[in-house]
Image: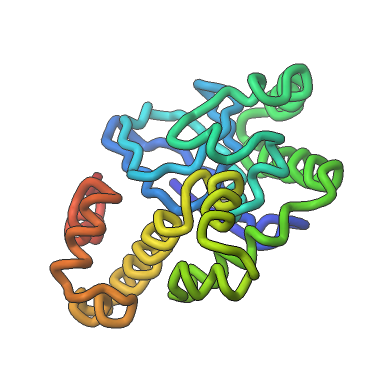
Amino acid sequence: MYRERAAVGIRSAVRWESVSAGDGVVRVLPDGCLDLLWSSRAGLLVAGPDRVAQVGRSVPGERWIGLRLPPGVGPAVFGVPAEELRDRRVPLADLWGRAAENLAERIEAGPLTHRPAAGAAVLEEAARARLRAAGGPDPLGARVAARLAAGATVAATAAEVGLGARALHRRSRLLFGYGPKTLARILRMGRALDLARGGVPLAEVAARTGYADQAHLTRDVRELAGVPPTRLLTPSTG
């Protein structure tokens, strides 16, 4: 079971809940986001920005709640540059100390049947408070991510936000965990898979999302996701 909806008070953030139905492979694709997570087995975690898919195994009955923060917002919430969390899963207590312990106690205080929705609201509240304390996210993150998500080149994006190539790369590492070229590849893969899941043929997907051809699309997705797009589009395939 998996469901999600828009978070309240954090633009473009998503709250989600899931329960593992059985033992199987779980493939989490890179998306440029950082997540604040609670697991019934592992407690509170931060999922950093991934460069490639993270592959693990689900534990039957394990419950998850999460708050997916849009690209560029995570550093203001967690208080560290995104590159320090890149490709990592970090206990929230390592970043927030006692505040993380208090947050876990609030989530785990209610009955299990009510925990997902209530727990997600607690995560949202904590993230909003951190954002307020930080004065909000760096607005550059949203501007850069929006341009790259729309298919703009890195050079065009740098010119539009008034930064040189090196400055944009440096700021991107702090905000997203990696440079703008990597973020652009990840966001393009996301656009391509969304179209393919909507029934658009892969050759047309490649043309509409800026790949040279379908073979280029397949190579890029395989590098980032670990499997070709046809595998990702097959139901119940990890």
- Judging depth in this view, the residue of 42 and 82 nearest the camera is 82
Q: Is residue 17 left or right of residue 226?
A: right
Which residue is found at the position 35% from the left and 31% from the top?
A: 58
Which residue is found at the position 39% from the left and 69% from the top?
A: 191
The type of colouring in the image is rainbow
Q: How many marks?
A: 0
Q: Can you give x and y, in whole percent of width and height, for residue 183 in the image?
A: 45, 56
Res. 109 visible in picture: no
The quarter in which the C terminus is drawn is top left
Asked if residue 149 is positioned above or below residue 119 in the image, the reply reads: below
Residue at the outermost left position: 215
Res. 81 visible in picture: yes
Which residue is found at the position 53% from the left and 33% from the top?
A: 85
Which residue is found at the position 62% from the left and 29% from the top?
A: 112
Q: Can you give x and y, in whole percent of width and height, for residue 22 in the image?
A: 32, 33
- Judging depth in this view, the residue of 193 and 188 nearest the camera is 188
Q: Can you give x and y, in whole percent of width and height, for residue 168 in the image?
A: 56, 58
